[in-house]
Image (cartoon, rainbow, N blue to C red):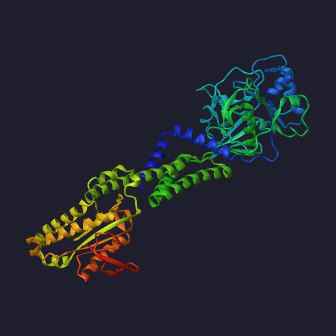
Amino acid sequence: MKAGAAAAALLALAALLAPGPAADIREAATDRLMALVPRPSEPAAPVVAVAVDEASLEAEGPWPWPREKLAALVTAVAEAGAAAVALDIVVEEPAAGDAALAEALGLVPTVQAALAGPRAAAGFGVAQLGGPDLAGVALLPGLAPPAIGGVPSAFAGLPGEVVRAAPLLVRLGAPGAEATAAPGLALAAIASALGERTLLLRGGAPMRLEVGPLVLDFPPDGLLRLHPARETVPMLPATALLDGALGPEALRGRLAVIGVTAPGAAALRGSVFGPFTPSLRLQAEAAAQIVAGWQPSRPPGGAMAEALAALLLGAVAAVLVRWRSGAGLVLAALLALGWVGAAAAVLRFGPLLLDPVLPAVAALLGGVAEAAAAALRLARERSALLARFAHRLPTGVADRLLALPEAERLRPERCNVAVVMTDLAGFSAMVNRTAPGSLVPALNAYLAGIEAAMLAEGATLERLIGDSVLGVFGAPLPQADHAARALAAARAVDRFAEAFRATPEAAALGWGETRIGVAAGEVLAGEIGGSRLTWAVCGDAANMAARLQELGKELGRRALVAAIEDPSLPPPLGRFALRGLPGQWEVRPLS
């Protein structure tokens, strides 16, 4: 758990210490989430975009159009019953036809886009109550006044390469000088449609911006986070209005935003709506969002809350992986998806903006880091096991095991083996009556001889318990002649044991005879042991070898064999029931 939690903690700390890059990643991910979870669309679109598109330029002439043509377009929009008009076209220099355009703009509540400057936001005022702080609101420098006063079209003044927000308010003025607040084009158009010329900004948490009956939360940066809708704002070609080809209901009672979309004439920017978005689309979508009151926003203390969520999810994922390695990784992935789903839910029903990436990545990182740490621990344990296990293997077998892929070295598997098990008769009584200083050297010499006899025939020493030795032939590496090897090893053990018992030192201790059981069959062999792995075999062959030792005591035989057919074996002694094993088994003496 420590590795996964530590990895998640480092990720959360990095996000807090490097807020800029973290915000860039968060915003890009939020763009994708917004595309997957669009905002609800209004049943009757309150905003319509009137586009000077390629078809309009082909029909009416190249851009820029003369002021009379713009006046005719505004007049057509007004006569179609639009509630208000936002002209997202900056008229920079005085020109012939300004009077006609001004007259057309007077037919309907209208706002005109301007870059910035002393005459920008003409006709609008912002009253502040409660001392709201506007220090975070974008400051646009004063520029030369346009031909017709208007409100700021401020997308060019927003930071970053991708437009993700529209200005509700901007500040106008030179840095260091007193600035005045002004509405952005979309909000000004709505205020104009409502017949409001004064916007009331109230302090508090959160700040509120009141435009007549419309009340909006006002974020510290004065920006409205744009969120694509399920259905985009309708886009009507300007030429259709100029030709009178639209029905009477196309614009009636709606806010019409007029702008340019034709490539080469329109300024295109990357945005949450796509890589090449005209200002007209941005302004129209912003106006539609304002009318709907849809204001996605970051919760207070969002970055810290997300860092804590990342830490928690990473730790939980680590616990799951520690609990169930393979399934834990799947559960960690589900945790990550669950967070993304939660971010989508609060966006759809909040609308709140939670980072969909940081906690999700922390969950995955916590799970993967814990799995990697567990794999490293297992690799170390296996290496240590091989190191301890090497002396129990025939010459060269350890090197052959290490040459295998790690996952294949000692993995549990079923295999056919032969087993030789020894037991020293009277050992417990000898231990009770003999001083350790006399017994232990003799026992060590005896066991070393037994081991050497088995290893010489290719045995793997599965266990050493007291006086008993169990040798396995055919695992962990297969041996085609495992039965013959087991018989040869048993005979070598019997010869050594009898010779050792005849030595003066052993005779003085009252050394007993060595009983031997030899059996063959299918076993499960491999790493077994839960948290403390060791190589072992489990199955009837090992149990049968132990029972043959017991039967040898009853029959007065040092070595007995079962489940092995070999021409070197004497005739069978009969069929016997072996404790713990089904049926009766044909048993032969070793010699």
With 186 as the anchor, is 161 left or right in this view?
left
Image quadrant containing the N terminus: bottom left
Query: Which of the 4 image quadrants contains residue 200?
Result: top right
With 266 as the anchor, is 344 left or right in this view?
left
Spot occupied by residue 207 in the image (x, y as percentages of width and height): 65, 44
With 511 as the anchor, is 230 left or right in this view?
right
Asked if residue 418 is positioned above or below residue 136 in the image, the reply reads below
Asked if residue 244 is positioned above or below residue 13 in the image, the reply reads above
Going by the picture, which residue comes out furthest to the bottom? 554
Asked if residue 496 is positioned above or below residue 350 in the image, the reply reads below
Image quadrant containing the C terminus: bottom left
Residue beneath the point at 31% across and 69% down: 567
Spot occupied by residue 27 in the image (x, y as percentages of width and height): 59, 40
Q: How many marks?
A: 0
Q: Nearer the viewer, residue 102 or 77?
A: 77
Residue beneath the point at 36% across and 59% down: 478
Q: Nearer the viewer, residue 313 or 572?
A: 572
Spot occupied by residue 360 in the image (x, y as percentages of width and height): 54, 49
Spot occupied by residue 560 in the image (x, y as percentages of width and height): 28, 75
Q: Nearer the viewer, residue 202 or 460?
A: 460
Q: Is residue 106 visible?
A: no
Q: Nearer the viewer, residue 411 or 226?
A: 411
Q: Is residue 115 visible?
A: yes
